[in-house]
Image (tube, grey):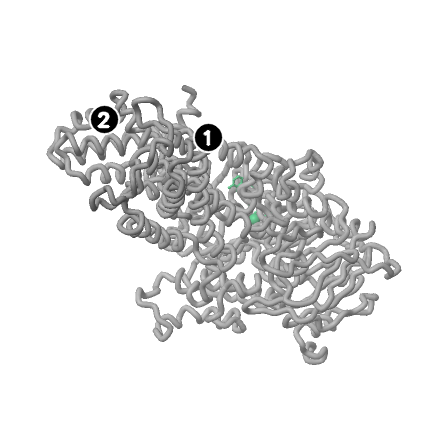
Amino acid sequence: MSPRILGAASPFILTIFVFLFLAVALFIGLGQPPFQTLAVLVQFAVGDSYSLSQTMAKTTPILLCALAAAVPGRLGLISVGAEGQLHAGAIAGTALVLLAPVWPAPVLIPLMLIFAAIGGAIYGYIPGLLRARLDVNETIVTLLMNYVTVLLVAALVFGPWRDPASQGWPATMQFPPNAVLPALPGSRIHLGLLLGLVAALALHIYFNHSRWADKVRILAGNRKVGETFGLSFGFWVMVLMSVGGALAGLAGISEVSAIQGRLQQSISLGYGLTGFLVSWLSRHQPLIILPVSLCVGGLVAGSDALQMFAKVPAASAVILQGLLFAAALAVPGLLARWRKAQ
Amino acid sequence: MPESLVQFAGVTRRFGDLIAVNNASLDIRAGEVLAILGENGAGKSTLMKMLYGLYPASEGQILLDGAPAKISGPADAMRNGIGMVFQHFSLLPALSVRDNLLLSWPKTPFWKSHRNARTDDVLTSLAELAPQIDPERIVSSLSVGEQQLVELCKVLNINARLVILDEPTSVLTPAEATRLHGFIKQLAGRGVAVALITHKLADVEACADRIVVMRRGSVVDIAERGARSMAETVALMMGQSVDRTLRPPPAFGRTVPRLVLENVSAQRPDMSLQGISLSIAAGEIVGVAGVAGNGQALLAEAVAGVEPLTAGDILLDGVSIARHTPFEAVSTPLGYIPEQPRDNGVVATMSLARNLALRDLAQGKRATGRHANLLERFNVNPPDPAKLAGTLSGGNVQKLVIARELGIQRDAILACYPTMGLDLAAIEMVYAAMFAQAASGAAVLWISEDLDDLLAGSHRIAVMREGRLVALLDNDGTLSREAVGALMTGMTETEAAA
Ligand SMILES: Nc1ncnc2c1ncn2[C@@H]1O[C@H](COP(=O)(O)OP(=O)(O)OP(=O)(O)O)[C@@H](O)[C@H]1O
Ligand SMILES: [Mg+2]
């Protein structure tokens, strides 16, 4: 490898090493054999086809939520609303399925996805509108709005949408087969992943190679200059917030349709926040978000399995994620400072 | 020989392949005012930023009190009694003047309150230097000149032994500049060393003890004041001699109104424009004179379509170009040189080529090749289209914006302090470009604080005070500096003379 590529890659390599070091320290602290536990973690993430399928299943919502944060992030907006938008999409998509459960799959599935995307988009549009017109901080609004749809899902599944046949379990009816996203046979790798991949590539092209790419870049770099030359900051805030919301909405409905099979509470394991962190780690670059979400998806799947099969507490999955993010945020900065001092 | 406080010994600083400062040696002595002159991009700011700890030197050494200085950042510099006021300000615009001063004051107690008497100490230098500024005002409502003064107070408050001022007078009115000169001399009298980066020979005349001239990164001359004539100094700076005479475009028949302001009114928290009406003909140059902070900035942004009007309209060849609501998208057809171009005129994270093509890019068009020779034509240094605009020196950012705005023929031009921070050769070039535009039919609205230049270069002079046009004068050769100055301040001429 040329020194230049090595120089560019060194923050990543170092981040992984620091993370492994911290993980080893954690396992020692938990009284587990560190290297063995680490090996088991890797085994559970990528060891066999089942583990791989689990990793992909976790990657999908993380990827979509990361893109949902990255799209407004390109304009310099800080949206933490993916969690709420995910639930809004889940509600909107489920509503259609409950209304028309017998429609054939070729009609129902695309419409369900569109409904979910619109649901998420509206949920992103509202904070976008408030920011554009009244200059209300989008971070606070998206944060607060998260609680609303999460609780709305609870209200729906405990109330009007509860399946009478479920004997008290708060959930909607099981989605009929014609409302379940197609998946690779025998795995949990479903259409949502493909949507995420396509979205990432499309966004990469849009933000880097399209004729409109520079509009967003100008506004992000200097709003006043953009407005001098006829760009409307408010317009782009609303567009990008809505598009981000739509992507998170897709994450919501694909969890409901392909993984859970019904709308219920806890359809998201904090994917919104995880996606937010992935997006910021990747500096809102879709092509970097792809591998980073895969790594984080593997970590989530691996540590999930770990807490079931090894003797580590349930919280260690979250702790491991935290360690990864802490390492990824701290290492490049420290490295840059160390290089500058040289 | 007076003892030296700071000594640069063969200091070099590279940015990639570019040598910004080349093997510079000089010393700064306690109690002296050291003027640093040089054309745009000569390396003046970089030299001082190394002393302030913002960049490490690539080679050579900086000695402080005779020992190698260990300054790795502004905090270290301040601890060592070195303060710097930048070309590009570092105030927090949303806070009051008082809070800004408290924030950078080492002795600020944790429990700050407005009734805390100890914090009043922070205001003493403000009272001395700029008594007209109310400490409770929000910084974003101050004029550029006033912000400059607040920056200066920040530095004075740390009891600096060495004060570095990077082009402090380029945004000050003549009266403010004179007060600053007096203040600088007073500082030097107290034993403080002052390093003064400037393009204005008036600053040098007024207060410098020694003069350092830089050219292309090297220190080419160090002399006591008076040892060289100003012409010699200028020749050293430029490597050639420049004569400084404005040649305004010829008079014209004032017939076709081109840029028309009808009862223009606009509102900001601390400033309002009240019914400004003005008609500028094709080929005419109207200069706007006024003390900083009397609504010029708001007028400029209203005319450029950045600030929405509350009443009135702005017409270019009969077509409205004003913004009426905050939400509509208006692309200004004017050649618009905003004040503080680093903040208001360029996208620092984009390349020079893209910054030149901003109009196209903002409209979703591809950048075309027609901007290719603008960098050379307007002497932007380095003329490297791939360089990021944020890495240019202050004066070169200004030239970049001017290249974009004056590089092609415009119907009308709105220029705010277009020569701010430029060296003499560049000023000449900017005026030539602006006058050439007028000569081929552009209507020019030119906001400036340099009365001499306005008097030499404009056909009519509009005087602004407190958001209104208080006078519109034909510049027929009989106008005097004093008469206009009196209108600017609202005093009668005799009061001003007294
Ligand atoms: N951070 C940076 N990265 C790359 N190049 C830089 C950087 N800072 C300055 N330069 C380059 O170094 C040279 C000297 O810049 P400097 O800001 O010191 O000039 P200056 O003498 O202060 O000019 P001016 O009068 O225009 O302010 C310029 O060519 C500039 O483009
Ligand atoms: Mg400079």
Residue B457 rendering spot, x and y as whole percentages: 77, 58
Residue hosting label 2: A44
Examine the image and state in which quarter residue A184 appears.
top left
Which quadrant: the N terminus of chain A? top left
Residue B447 left/right relative to A287: right
Eye-nearest disc, 1 or 2: 1
Residue hosting label 1: A198
Q: Residues within 10 Å of mark 2 (few under 14, many from 20)?
A: many
Q: How many marks?
A: 2
Disc 2 element? helix
Residue B153 rendering spot, x and y as whole percentages: 47, 64
Residue B111 rendering spot, x and y as whole percentages: 31, 67
Which quadrant: the C terminus of chain A? top left
Residue B49 rendering spot, x and y as whole percentages: 48, 47
Judge by depth and name the residue closer to the eye, B287 or B196: B287
**Amino acid type indicated by mark 2:** Phe
